[in-house]
Image: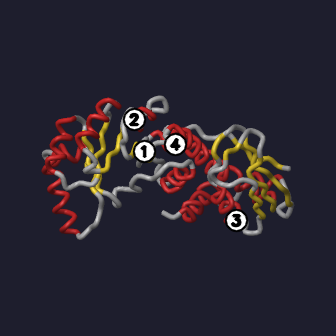
Amino acid sequence: MTIDYLIELAIREDLGDGDHTSLATGPASAKGKAQLLLKEKGILAGMDIANSVFKKIDRDTIFQPFKKDGSLVRNGEVAFEVEGKIISLLAAERLVLNFMQRMSGIATYTNILVRKLEGLNTKLLDTRKTTPLLREVEKQAVRIGGGYNHRFGLFDMIMIKDNHIDFAGGIRQAIDATTIYLKKTNKDLKIEIEVRNFRELSEVLETGGINRIMLDNFSPHDLKKALELINGKFETEASGGITLENIRSYAETGVDYISVGALTHQIKSLDMSLKAV
């Protein structure tokens, strides 16, 4: 789903056959200005989407940005000013805030974790734990915050997790079946497999045929030991139980990637408001 189409659906959902409150309380031709006021410190995200929302509701709206996506903003600063018909500004207000508050919250928390990795080679990844239909928007916010995107969906990477392994009858069977499937379908997809302990890791190393190993819920101590066993043969990813307090310890092991689902599903929206001027 493209972001433009997502914006159109959001407008249709919110606006319906018209903003009857605004239409009832003010002249349709009256014009005004409003500013997006930041109320707390964070990383700004969603400026282009905000502009698109205003323009899709009323193409004559004038959007003047003062900040860029990825900017560090503080309480009291103004991100943009918008000018146009008052009924158009009011119709767009909540949609703009919904997009920008959530995106900025994601970008802010992502950036906090990214800064914990400074000086190290480990990259921070998001996951598929996103709001349905908002994945592109939320993954964009992760990038704005300095993180990287894992696979977008079920279609662009092979990700063999515990349930796949259990249903397939084991690690070797799951990998072998995947290899056969990719050849049969002529698909060129990277293969990642999840391991939960050293026994499973040993079996993956013996089997091979994959690109990346996800080490799930390993402690930093065990992760370091696992990386020594892998010895650079495959890309590595740590996941599970990783927090703001311990992410640096995980990264210091030398793991290639750390994935954190909380980037997109346990975030606090950044406080901001659209105020008439």
Q: Residues within 10 Å of mark 1 (few under 14, many from 20)?
A: many
Q: Position of residue 60 (x, y in %)?
A: 77, 68
Q: Amino acid at mark 2?
A: Tyr
Kindly identify which residue carries mark 2. Answer: 250
Kindly identify which residue carries mark 4. Answer: 114
On screen, residue 26 versus residue 154, left or right, reads right
Which residue is at a point 74% across and 57% down the rendered structure image?
65
Instruction: Mark 3 or mark 1: name the one nearer the start of the chain.
Output: 3
Q: CA distance from mark 4 to mark 1?
A: 9 Å
Asked if labels 1 and 2 touch by Cβ distance under 8 angstroms, the answer is yes
Asked if labels 4 and 3 touch by Cβ distance under 8 angstroms, the answer is no
Closer to the observer: label 4 or label 1?
1
Instruction: Mark 2 or mark 3: name the one nearer the start of the chain.
Output: 3
Kindly identify which residue carries mark 1. Answer: 122
Report which quarter residue 200 is drawn in.
top left
Instruction: Mark 2 or mark 4: name the one nearer the start of the chain.
Output: 4
Q: How is the image coloured?
A: secondary structure
Q: Is residue 213 above or below residue 47?
A: above
Which residue is at a point 45% across and 45% down the rendered structure image?
124
Kindly identify which residue carries mark 3. Answer: 55
Q: Position of residue 76 (x, y in %)?
A: 78, 40
